[in-house]
């Protein structure tokens, strides 16, 4: 089974499911094997690698960066670097 959250890095829920059709062959990464429940969890997006991890590859704790404020919320601000 591939959970909705493991279909796409940039598309969520039903929107991510629109890409797939019954009978289609896909590549997936085995995320978990649960012998007791006889279930294997798969991830399709993981085959491509995490784009966030690639984007922040050169950024380390303590680094000084410049960014643009893209959203102001009650919980904080979102900054694009």
Image (cartoon, rainbow, N blue to C red):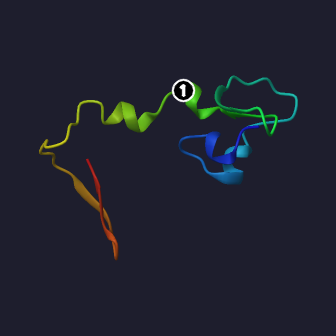
Residue 65, located in which quarter of the rendered image? top left
Q: Is residue 1 left or right of residue 62?
A: right
Q: Position of residue 78 (x, y in %)?
A: 32, 61
Answer with the quarter of the image where residue 44 lies.
Answer: top right
Label 1, residues with CA under 10 Å away: few <14, some 14-19, many ≥20: few
- Which type of secondary structure does the marked residue at label 1 adopt? loop
Q: Nearer the viewer, residue 52 or 11?
A: 52
Side of 9 where 44 appears, left or right = right
Seen in the picture, residue 44 relative to 72 is either above or below; the reply is above
Residue 67 placement (x, y as % from top left)? 21, 52
Q: Residue furthest right?
A: 23
Q: 60 or 31, which is in the foreground? A: 31
Residue at the limit of the structure toward the front, as seen here: 36
Locate residue 52, reporting x and y percent: 40, 38
Q: Position of residue 79 (x, y in %)?
A: 28, 56
Q: Quadrant of residue 18?
A: top right
Q: Is residue 68 above or below residue 53?
A: below
The residue singled out by tag 1 in the image is 48
Where 45 falls versus 73 (above or below)? above
Residue farthest to the bottom, as pictured: 74
Residue drawn where x is 69% and y is 22% of the image: 27
**Relative to the observer, which residue lies in front, 42 or 78?**
42
Count of picture labels = 1
Which residue is located at x 59 percent, y 47 percent?
Answer: 11
Q: Which quadrant: the N terminus?
A: top right
**Does residue 61 lie above or below 26 as drawn?**
below
């Amino acid at each position: 089974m591939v959970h909705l959250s493991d279909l796409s890095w940039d598309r969520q829920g039903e929107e991510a499911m629109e890409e797939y059709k019954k009978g289609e062959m896909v590549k997936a990464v085995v995320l978990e094997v649960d012998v007791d429940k006889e279930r294997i969890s798969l991830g399709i997006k993981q085959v491509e690698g995490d784009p966030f991890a690639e984007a922040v590859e050169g950024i380390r704790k303590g680094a000084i960066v410049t960014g643009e404020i893209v959203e102001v919320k009650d919980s904080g601000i979102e900054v694009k670097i």
